[in-house]
């Protein structure tokens, strides 16, 4: 009965790492601006789709991935400047809706530019599975985990050691005070969107060889990434990563043992249960907006 | 606190304790408001005045103690049932319904007192029309009373600050409360507006026969309109009595009257 | 100054109904009638969603689910269970309302983006169930064989006949919404949107009112769903997914939040738009997104707000000329 367990664990961790990265992107923007960016999933989609496109245009694989991530980072920054910045002072619901609008635009644009087909990115270092501990581990899975860890380490360094990183944390705690000590909140917002775009694109690019990608993967991935975020406690970046891993493993085991068709529903059921019962997540502090 | 100072009490809070985690906002606090009076609740910042208001209106639960309004135990009632029980409040930071007109704001004040089934409003039955007409008339009357009748069609958000304060009071009056609680009603008003506010408070007591409870920092206003004052300090009543008694009380002076404006 | 409270809304709704019934005479052929029918059904949902989103300020990104629940419920009742069509329709609406009631209790305690995500999650779960419960719903390829609407022995087998039914329903729903908003309940909803604290202090039960408007808007979506099912005779999960939920939100926002007429206009416009863009097949998603972004940025009050502002400007210039 448990024969599939190691395999489910591996695929769960792989997928979960990607969810964690997506959740991280949400957290970045939320921490700096207080906005939940419903277009985060589209950044992920763009990472994979643009990488495929750059590859088709002749760039070597890793350069294609890099280019895709940079372009998406710019897209994120543009989104902040053109769609979010003008809304300063408007009711919160406007920001929610405009990020939904941008996500639709990005999805529509991708459909026009890349067509409706599902495409695959080649794996970074081949497809020969590594057989160990009862599971066949794809080398790409190791890439996913490695890149995720590297990004997490890099972000930790960024927040702890660089002035911009500390400035972003300051905005997260107290926007008014941050601007009073000379931190440009607007620039931090721009930076946060750019970094979230980058992280999202990385998640998309490293996942694309495993799960394939198309113009409409953004929605599901985005919501699942948000679920990871909430699971770990909204605002806690490492909680988001941990939440993603838990979610990925739960989903994987659920699909394996219960019913694979309902696999996608797992993330949302977990999300709903969390929101109803403990919105502060596993690692968050209580005190979420509730009546 | 001598029991006869408060007879007959409209509001009787006894032994109220409110804890937020480790912080004791109110500790075994007694507070009463005599029927037909204007009673002020004063004290330094952090003394627990807002918490007491919130406890009376149900926005905060008391951990211990009782709250009786006109003999009825209201401590267990959820906040939205307290209006029907007879206590309505205004807010320190204006909470005017900016998306509605001045008249609609005050008609909303009649919510607890207007009753018709939703079906009646859908079908526009005669009972509905009568109730709405009555609601409108009472609302206009309240607006007249505070001096806002000319602005009844104005979007509430367009009123100047001082008039929005009057709107909140008209709205609360429309609920025909037994007890009206005013939370720093003079905040942000100039001296002329404050004087008019004082007149209005006295008129509410005398002409509308509504008991008024008042949390305020403006000492001149308090001394002018209050029949009865309770001083809170560190979540517990320090002294209680008439304005003259309070002004002369050495503990009160020591606690904060000396540092007041 | 005594203004009759009665009749104003009823007259407007009646005029609207007349306009609706006359409008098809301007359409070149029967094909456009089917668009008009769908437009009116979307308008029914949009009016309900506007009560929730525009008046009460509660966002729902999963409303297509209630549309689908109504449709599938009546489909199953009138085919598998062999119930008469009116019974199926009532069950469809009731089921949508019942599910909404159950969901509302925990969901409406949330606010802002948490509420948005919860409704989004709910909508996606329902959509997945529609796709996966193949034995019940027929799965992704859909459910066929739903009978055409028939009431009191008369079957509405022409598009024109069906359009008349739908027009009457829409006019009735508009009247219902207008009457509701100009009443104690309407004031309570608008109040709790601005300040829950103040609304509570005046005796308004916030949770009960939110639940009421959520269930009402779900019931209206369910009503549109049953009419949709008995019109097309065929339903598929793709019509009841996240994509349509978003389109509904765009309709309400474009029309102008807290405007019943605005929602109708937004729904009719956005139903007609893909037809106009039919030649530019893949652009419609893009256009939707662009409309949403542009509306929020430049016209946050929507079409209705824009019209009101224009009207006021016109009045002011008239008044200043008169002086």
Image: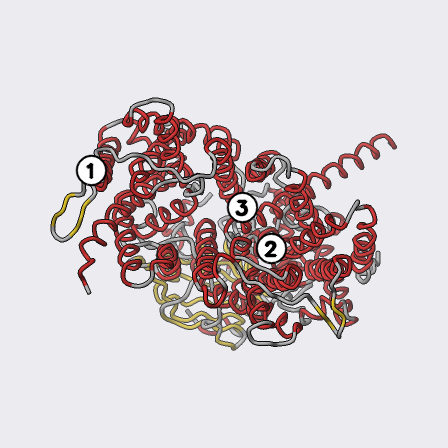
- Nearest the viewer among C244 and C203 is C244
Closer to us: mark 1 or mark 3? 1
Q: Quadrant of residue A17?
A: top left
Closer to us: mark 3 or mark 2? 2
Mark 3 residue element: loop
Q: CA distance from mark 1 to mark 3?
A: 59 Å
- Nearest the viewer among C306 and A287 is C306
Asked if marks 3 and 2 touch (Cβ < 8 Å), the reply is: no
Which residue was labeled with disc 2?
C49
Few, some or many C-alpha atoms within 10 Å of disc 1 (few <14, some 14-19, many ≥20)?
Answer: few
- Nearest the viewer among C267 and B2 is C267
In the displayed image of the protein, which residue is found farthest to the top? A58
Q: Which disc is residue A146 wearing? A: 1
| Chain of residue at mark 2 | C
Q: Position of residue C172 (x, y in %)?
A: 74, 62
Q: Which disc is residue B187 wearing? A: 3
């Amino acid at each position: 009965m448990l024969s599939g367990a190691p395999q489910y664990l591996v695929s769960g961790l792989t997928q979960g790492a990607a969810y964690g990265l997506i959740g991280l992107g949400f957290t970045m923007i939320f921490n700096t601006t207080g906005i939940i960016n419903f277009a985060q999933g589209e950044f992920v989609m763009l990472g994979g789709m643009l990488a495929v496109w750059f590859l088709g245009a002749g760039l070597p694989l890793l350069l294609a991935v890099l280019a895709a991530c940079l372009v998406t980072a710019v897209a994120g920054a543009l989104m902040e400047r053109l769609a979010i910045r003008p809304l300063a002072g408007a009711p919160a619901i406007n920001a929610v809706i405009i990020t939904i609008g941008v996500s639709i635009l990005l999805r529509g644009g991708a459909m026009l530019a890349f067509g409706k087909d599902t495409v695959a990115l080649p794996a970074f270092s081949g497809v020969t599975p590594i057989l160990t501990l009862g599971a066949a581990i794809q080398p790409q899975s190791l890439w996913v985990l490695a890149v995720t860890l590297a990004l997490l380490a890099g972000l930790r360094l960024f927040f702890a050691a660089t002035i911009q990183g500390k400035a972003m944390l300051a905005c997260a705690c107290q926007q008014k005070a941050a601007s009073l000590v000379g931190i440009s909140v607007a620039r931090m917002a721009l930076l946060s969107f750019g970094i979230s775009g980058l992280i999202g694109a990385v998640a998309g690019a490293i996942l694309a060889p495993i799960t394939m990608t198309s113009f409409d993967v953004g929605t599901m991935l985005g919501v699942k990434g948000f679920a990871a975020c909430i699971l770990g406690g909204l605002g806690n970046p490492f909680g988001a990563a941990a939440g993603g891993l838990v979610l990925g493993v739960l989903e994987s085991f659920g699909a394996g043992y219960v019913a694979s068709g309902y696999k996608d529903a797992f993330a949302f059921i977990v999300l709903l249960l969390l929101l109803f019962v403990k919105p502060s997540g596993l690692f968050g502090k209580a005190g979420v907006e509730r009546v | 606190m001598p029991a006869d100072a408060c007879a007959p009490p409209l509001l009787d809070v006894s032994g109220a304790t409110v804890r937020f985690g480790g912080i004791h906002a109110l500790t075994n606090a007694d507070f009463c408001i005599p029927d037909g009076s204007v009673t002020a609740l004063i004290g330094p910042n952090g003394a627990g005045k807002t918490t007491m208001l919130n406890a009376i209106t149900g926005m905060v639960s008391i951990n211990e103690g009782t709250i009786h309004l006109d003999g009825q135990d209201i401590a267990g009632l959820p906040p939205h049932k307290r209006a029907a029980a007879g206590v309505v409040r205004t807010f320190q930071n204006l909470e005017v319904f900016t998306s509605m007109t001045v008249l609609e704001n005050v008609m909303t004040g009649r919510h607890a007192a207007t009753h018709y089934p939703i079906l009646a409003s859908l079908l526009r039955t005669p009972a509905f029309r009568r109730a709405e007409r009555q609601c409108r008339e009472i609302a206009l009357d309240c607006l007249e009373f505070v001096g806002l009748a000319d602005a009844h069609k104005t979007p509430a958000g367009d009123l100047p600050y001082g008039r929005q304060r009057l709107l909140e009071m008209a709205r609360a009056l429309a609920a025909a409360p037994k007890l009206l609680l005013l939370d720093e009603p003079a905040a942000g008003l100039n001296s002329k507006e404050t004087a008019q506010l004082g007149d209005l408070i006295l008129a509410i007591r005398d002409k509308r026969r509504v008991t008024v409870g008042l949390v305020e920092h403006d000492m001149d206003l308090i001394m002018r309109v209050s029949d009865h004052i309770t001083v809170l300090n560190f979540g517990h009543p320090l002294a209680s009595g008439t304005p003259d008694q309070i002004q002369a009380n050495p503990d009160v002076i020591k606690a904060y009257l000396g540092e007041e404006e | 100054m005594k203004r009759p409270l009665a009749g104003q809304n009823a007259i407007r709704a009646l005029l609207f109904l007349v306009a609706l019934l006359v409008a098809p005479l301007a359409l070149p052929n029967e094909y456009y009638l089917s668009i008009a029918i769908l437009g009116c059904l979307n308008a029914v949902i949009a009016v309900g969603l506007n009560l929730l989103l525009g008046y009460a300020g509660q966002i729902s990104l999963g409303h297509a689910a209630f549309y689908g629940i109504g449709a599938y419920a009546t489909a199953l009742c009138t085919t598998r269970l062999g119930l008469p069509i009116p019974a199926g329709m009532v069950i469809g609406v009731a089921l949508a309302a019942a599910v909404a009631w159950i969901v509302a209790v925990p969901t409406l305690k949330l606010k802002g983006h948490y509420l948005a995500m919860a409704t989004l999650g709910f909508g996606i779960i329902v959509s997945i169930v529609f796709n996966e419960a193949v034995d019940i719903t027929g799965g992704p390829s859909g459910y066929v064989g739903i009978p055409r609407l028939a009431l009191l022995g008369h079957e509405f087998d022409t598009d024109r006949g069906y359009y008349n039914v739908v027009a009457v329903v829409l006019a009735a729903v508009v009247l219902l919404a207008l009457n509701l908003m100009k009443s104690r309940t309407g004031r309570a909803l608008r109040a709790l949107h601005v300040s829950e604290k103040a609304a509570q202090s005046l005796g308004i039960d916030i949770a009960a009112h939110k639940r009421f408007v959520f269930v009402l808007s779900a019931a209206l979506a369910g009503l549109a769903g049953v009419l949709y099912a008995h019109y097309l005779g065929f339903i598929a999960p793709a019509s009841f997914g996240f994509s349509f939920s978003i389109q509904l939100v765009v309709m309400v926002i474009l029309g102008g939040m807290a405007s019943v007429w605005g929602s109708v206009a937004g729904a009719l416009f956005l139903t007609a738009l893909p037809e106009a863009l039919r030649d530019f097949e893949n652009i419609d998603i893009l256009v939707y997104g662009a409309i949403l972004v542009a509306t929020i940025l430049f016209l946050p009050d929507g079409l209705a707000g824009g019209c009101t502002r224009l009207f006021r400007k016109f009045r002011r210039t008239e008044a200043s000329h008169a002086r």
